[in-house]
Image (spheres, grey):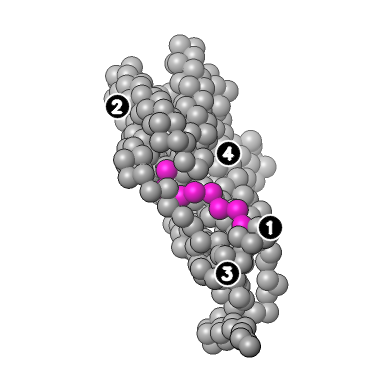
Amino acid sequence: MVTTTQRRPAAPPARLRGVQRLPLASEATLRKLAYASLATQAGIIVTGGAVRLTDSGLGCPEWPRCTAQSWTSTPEMGIHGAVEFGNRLLTFVLGFVALAMLLAVIRTFTSDRPRRDLLYPSIFLFGVIPAQAFIGGITVWTNLNPWVVMFHFLVSAVLVGVATVLVRRAQRPALAVPRRIGVPWLERLGVVTLVATAITIYLGTVVTGSGPHAGDPDAPRTGFDLGLVAGFHAHAAAVMLGLTIGLYFAARVAGSPGRTARTAAFLLGALLAQGIVGAVQYRLELPELLVAIHLAGAAVMVFAAVDAWYATRWHPVRVTGGARSEAVRAA
């Protein structure tokens, strides 16, 4: 007769025992926190754009205080002060969501289903948010220097990308063993497409830094010719378009492993929509509403590009029934 002994989970390290007082988050809760991380990181890009498009970039002329005498905006500062201070308050929302995500992940390390795959993205999001707030302070100290403002946006774009990875990993069941796609040339094409997206978005920030929406009437500009940098941005978008089309058809040729073809198709749709909005806003001399839509589209493009790249690397994992038992043995 063969007997089996069930292995008891190891006792958590002493440094984590205090975390056991927190409730253990379910997988559904972890996924919701990951979605909230992505939504808030993308949302603050839009609200930050609203600050700039309403000329409220210096609505609070000091940092970290709003003024030398007050931590908050005052009625005398009008709508500009309220808009800028409101955007600052949203940083606390991001920090709360990131902290909740990190604590929920750390709590799993005291259980029999630790989520090691979620730890580093959670640490990155929580750790960079204070740095991002400080960069926002530098933008105020430098009177909205366009290069600092551009860097501020690009950090947010990176955070959206990391949050995208966090979402996809959170969708993976705790006991599942991830499986690589295993098509190296497809993975390399995904990386090249992601790099092209980064270059396109960077050049888009240069266009913004050279355009009329500075965030304050007295804020400096890059000094570049707007038509010239817009042309560079358009050419980079055209290269990205070609790579995205290539990624879609390459995924189909490879048998569309995992979600690769679907994510490439979504990226293609986002890029085409973004291109149409960009062309129209340029023809109409950059009306605020279209600029805001274009800015929101940039966040969608970051999500779509990172998701497409991720789909060239990993199969989606859904563990049920007997497959869950297999995952337990492989873990």
Counting from the top left corner in percent of width and height, residue 202 is at 36, 35
Q: Quadrant of the N terminus?
A: bottom right
At label 3, the amino acid type is Val
Looking at the image, is mark 1 or mark 3 nearer the viewer? 3
Q: Helix, strand, or loop for circle 3? A: helix
Q: Residue at x 58, y 23 (%)?
A: 289
Counting from the top left corner in percent of width and height, residue 189 is at 34, 37
Q: Magenta part of the protein: which range?
A: 312-319
Going from N to C along the chain, the mark reached first, 4 or 1, is 1
Which residue carries the number 2 mark?
223
Residue situated furthest front in the rendering: 1
Q: Residue at x 55, y 28 (%)?
A: 292
Is the C-beta separation of discs 1 and 2 under 8 Å?
no
Choose between 128 and 81: the one closer to the eye. Answer: 128
Q: Residues within 10 Å of mark 4 (few under 14, many from 20)?
A: many
The numbered disc on residue 47 is 4
